[in-house]
Image (tube, rainbow, N blue to C red):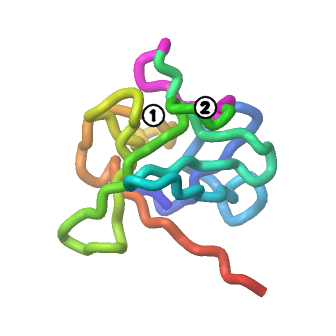
Amino acid sequence: MSKTHKNIKCMKDEVQADGGFGKGATWVVEYLGNGEVRFLHSNREKYLKVNVNKDGAVNTKGSGGKACHFKVQNKKEKPGRLVTFESVVSPDKFLRVEEDGSVTVGVDKGAASKFRVLRKKEN
């Protein structure tokens, strides 16, 4: 979930913060160790990726390599509730939601870079 209070969704290769709870907005967070994770889109079987050739671009064309890795950081004001995701290939650049709902990486700008991770209930 993002500051838009919508889920991050994937439509084709684009990533937007205007999703609901359907398949387009369902991600599997894979823990890689050392505080690193990657996001597998459950419907497309591709990873959320930072495009290092384009400034701040994020897509779902990843195969799981370092461009798909993020360091998780808990925010001190509410530990365990809000987190940021720092790009491993672009240090000091964080996954964030822009005013138009697009998802990019850039400098940490408070609410734009904070996410709440929700767990899917098991049946």
Q: Amino acid at mark 2?
A: Asn
Q: Residue at x 52, y 22 (%)?
A: 51
Q: Residues within 10 Å of mark 1 (few under 14, many from 20)?
A: many
Residue 118 is marked as: none
Residue 63: x percent and y percent? 68, 33
Q: Residue at x 36, y 28 (%)?
A: 90
Q: Which residue is mark 2?
A: 59
105 with respect to 61 (left or right): left
Q: Is residue 50 above or below residue 26?
A: above
Residue that sits furthest to the left in the current view: 77
Q: Residue at x 54, y 36 (%)?
A: 68
Q: Amino acid at mark 1?
A: Thr
Residue 92 falls in which quadrant of the image? top left
Q: Residues within 10 Å of mark 2 (few under 14, many from 20)?
A: many
Q: Residue at x 29, y 54 (%)?
A: 111
Residue 76: x percent and y percent? 19, 67
> In the rendered image, which quarter contains the C terminus?
bottom right
Q: Which comes before the other along the chain, label 2 or label 1?
A: 2
Q: Is residue 29 above or below residue 82?
A: above
| Magenta-drawn stretch contains 65 | no
Residue 104 is marked as: 1
- Number of numbered discs on residues: 2
Q: CA distance from mark 2 to mark 1?
A: 9 Å
15 with respect to 53 (left or right): right
| Magenta-drawn stretch contains 58 | yes
| Magenta residue span | 53-62
Residue 10 falls in which quadrant of the image? top right
Residue 35: x percent and y percent? 38, 55
Residue 45: x percent and y percent? 77, 44
108 with respect to 19 (left or right): left
Q: Report helix, strand or loop for mark 1.
A: strand
